[in-house]
Every structure is written in structure tokens, then in C-alpha cells.
Image: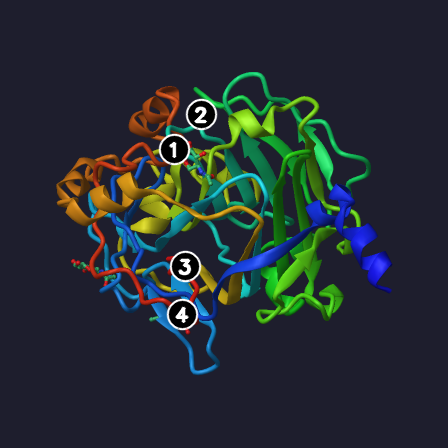
Amino acid sequence: MKAAVLALAVLPIVLGATYPLAESWNPLPFSRAAQLTIISGDVFWGKPSNQSLYYTTSKGTTILKVDNTSFVPYNDKRFAPKLLSKSAYGVGTVWVMDAVHMPYGCSVWPAFWTQGPNWPNGGEIDIVEGINQQQGNQIAVHAASGCTATPIGQTTGSLTQANCAGGAGASGCLFKDNNANSFGSAFAAAGGGVYVAELASDGIRVWFMSRSNVPSTLTASSSSIDTSTLGTPVASYSSSSCNIAQLFTPQTLTLTITLCGDWAGNAIQETCPALVSPQTCYTTYVINEPAQKYDNAYFEINYVNIYSSTKSNVTGSSASSAASGTGASRTQTVGTQQSGSAAAQSSRAAGKKRWEGMGVGWVVGVAVAGVAGGVAALF
Ligand SMILES: *[C@@H]1O[C@H](CO)[C@@H](O)[C@H](O)[C@H]1NC(C)=O
Ligand SMILES: *[C@@H]1O[C@H](CO)[C@@H](O)[C@H](O)[C@H]1NC(C)=O
Ligand SMILES: *[C@@H]1O[C@H](CO)[C@@H](O)[C@H](O)[C@H]1NC(C)=O
């Protein structure tokens, strides 16, 4: 028995697939909610003090939601949530989110994603992303030039775009999850599910398990995760055609819901009623009374766990600029009211898809949440 364990321990392939728990959030703290210049979309990022956007239910689940109660006058924007992890993790990390509801609805653009600094140079993994009434998740990887998607063995999802290079107008390299339960109303109807993303030296893999298929080993209290037990991933990106170690710096976990913008706004007619000029995504959905337009624009999360074989890499510069931000940059967003507007297009052309305010315009309302069970604060 002992010999067998030792033999196992020297096999790097076995070690590489098992990661110890680094941080567990159940519920998620809101102290890292950030308000900054929005690049693509007609929202103001809510601050931790916006308790109608960030709260915990009596069941212990975490809600992150778009403001669905305020009248928004023309030229103003609607408040929406953005959460950033305090720590960043590099190659050798698995992120897990168990949710019961994902945001959806016309003009709604949620994402559960990771990002390195200086987009696209530090890399970006869109673990869950979708727009409007889209069926099924769309997974994306963005990196600096010289990265293309080559699946590692089989995937259940379909590779629809192979070029991962970031920069102007880039969509990243994409996999479509063919399981409709992976996003939108079908996700909620099936009781939600679990998304898992692995950043490993041999590549990036993303899994989705609808509620009835979540393995019993995958819980908030699981002290480790063995990705070799998760089955065929939905998406995978081999390091053979994308230099993971070089292109992916430590990643900050990010949860956002934006409205309209250069994807949800421009593609609105794909799953929502076509807009007739001069109506725009912004004038049709974002402003005035919310009516019931945003009642489904929320995440309801059971837990987020991070498993890692590397030490956390706390992004000190972001944290300090976050604390010292003034929020003055908010005014820059007023007036870009048209979805798919010139401002959105030019920001995309500038090669900064949706976070060019990073590090310059952040506001964090309160101190970072306390240490939980000896584990460093995440959000
Ligand atoms: C969010 O908080 C800001 C102040 O920080 C306030 O002006 C705004 O009205 C709040 N929005 C909502 C939806 O509560
Ligand atoms: C806002 O949305 C929630 C569900 O997320 C719903 O329960 C509530 O009734 C909505 N509020 C209004 C005023 O529409
Ligand atoms: C932390 O980040 C810095 C800068 O990106 C990098 O040089 C360093 O290798 C990282 N450390 C770890 C443990 O990932």
C-alpha cells in the first residue's frame, strides 16, 4: 500500500491533475465590487454599498444582479455588478463555480471569467459568457498574438473560432457548448450546475455539469479536485499551439453583468426582437422603468472555489489603485448611450475589449473581507 502511494506520488501526470483547495467562498463577500469606467456596455458598476445589487439570501446563496427597480433617465446608465478577486493565480489552477441561476434576457451580457493585466497580453479565459437569450454557453480564450486553439483530445463542445489573438475586434478563440442547459433559462430550469476551468501547463480545459450530472465529489467543502475524473471537457486549448506559460500571467477572477455593448447590443436581433432605427439596445432596454426587463439578470451562486498548486499572486498594483480611485472616471461613460455606438466601437478598436479602466478608475467602498478559516480573502 505504501509502495503504491509512493509510486503514484512520483508520477507527474497524476500530481498535475489533482489540485488542493486554495480559497473557498460560500457566500461571496462583496468588498471587491468595483466601479470603474465601463468600456463596452451601458452600465455603472455597483459598489459594495449597493445592497440591492449584491446580497446573500436566507439560503446562503450569493446574488449579483442588475438594478431592476430604478428609473434610469436618458443619458444615464443602469447599475450592474462587477466582482474582482483580490488574488490572482497562474498556471496550475482550477476555478469552480456552482450556481443555480445565470443572468439572461435581452440586452444582458454576463460573464464569469479570468484576466491577466494589460489585456490581451496577460491572457483571458471566458469560462461562461453569453448574451441576450442565447442558448448554451460560449467559452473563449484571448491571448496575445501567436495563440490558436487546438483541442486536447475530444471535447463535447464545438470549436467555432480558432484564432485566440486579442486586439482590435477580436472575439478570441471560441467553443460553443452544445448543452443548452449550460446557459440562460435552461440552466435555471435544470437547477443550475457547475463550471470548472483548469489552467495547466499542457493547456486550458473547461467543463460544465448540469445539476443532475454534478459528481458527488464536487462540493463546496471538497479539499481537492482531480480534473482527470471530470470526463471529457466542453472545451480545451492545447499548449502545443498556444504557449500557456508565456501568454497567461496570474489571472484575476471576475464576475460581471453588462448591458448592450459591442456584443449584446450588436447581436441583439439574433435572439431578441430586431430594433428599428432610431431605437437602440440602450433606448429599448436600459433606460426608463425597468418593468420586468431585468428580473432574470442575476447570478445566484452556491459557492466559488479555487484550487491551486501555485501560490496566489495578489495583484498589489490593482489593489492599491482600487483603494485610491476617485470614481471621477464614471463621468466618462455618460453620453455613450447608443448600443454598438461609436464609443464602443472605438474602444474595441483600441484593443481593450471591456476593461481598459483597469487600475486607473477603480473605487472600492470598504476594506477587503476578513480571512476565512485561515484562507486569504478572495473578493
Ligand atoms: C449605487 O450607489 C451609488 C452611490 O455610491 C448611488 O448613487 C446609486 O444610486 C446606487 N445604485 C443603486 C441601484 O442602488
Ligand atoms: C426584480 O427581480 C427580482 C428577481 O431577480 C424579482 O423578485 C423582483 O420582483 C423584481 N423587482 C421588480 C420591482 O421588478
Ligand atoms: C506573480 O506575478 C508576477 C508578475 O506577473 C510574476 O513575475 C510571478 O512569477 C508571479 N508569481 C506566481 C507565483 O505566479
Mark 1 lies on residue: 117
Residue picked out by circle 3: 293
Do the residues bearing badges 4 and 1 touch, measured as CB atoms within 8 Å? no
Give the residue type that dot 3 points to: Lys
Ligand 3 under 8 Å from disc 1 Cβ: yes
Task: First in sequence, mark 4 or 1: give its number.
Answer: 1
Q: Earlier in the sequence, mark 1 or mark 3?
A: 1
Q: Residue furthest top?
A: 146
| Position of residue 159 in the picture relative to residue 260 (left or right) | right
Cβ–Cβ below 8 Å for labels 1 and 2?
A: yes
**Residue 121 badge:** 2
* Helix, strand or loop for disc 1: loop
Residue at x 38% of width, y 35% of height: 354
Q: In the rendered image, is residue 254 in sight? A: yes
Which mark, residue 372?
4
Residue type, mark 1 in image = Pro
- Secondary structure under tag 4 reads loop
CA separation in Å, label 2 and label 4: 32 Å
Residue 20 placement, left or right of 179: left
Of callouts 4 and 3, the N-terminal one: 3
Image coords of residue 88 (percent x, y): 43, 45
Tell which tag, 4 or 3, sits nearer the viewer. 4
Residue 146, horizontal then vertical, whole percent:
58, 16
Q: Nearer the viewer, residue 133 or 92?
A: 92
Furthest toward the bottom, the residue is 58
- Residue 336 on image: x %, y %: 25, 35
- Mark 2 is on which residue type? Asn
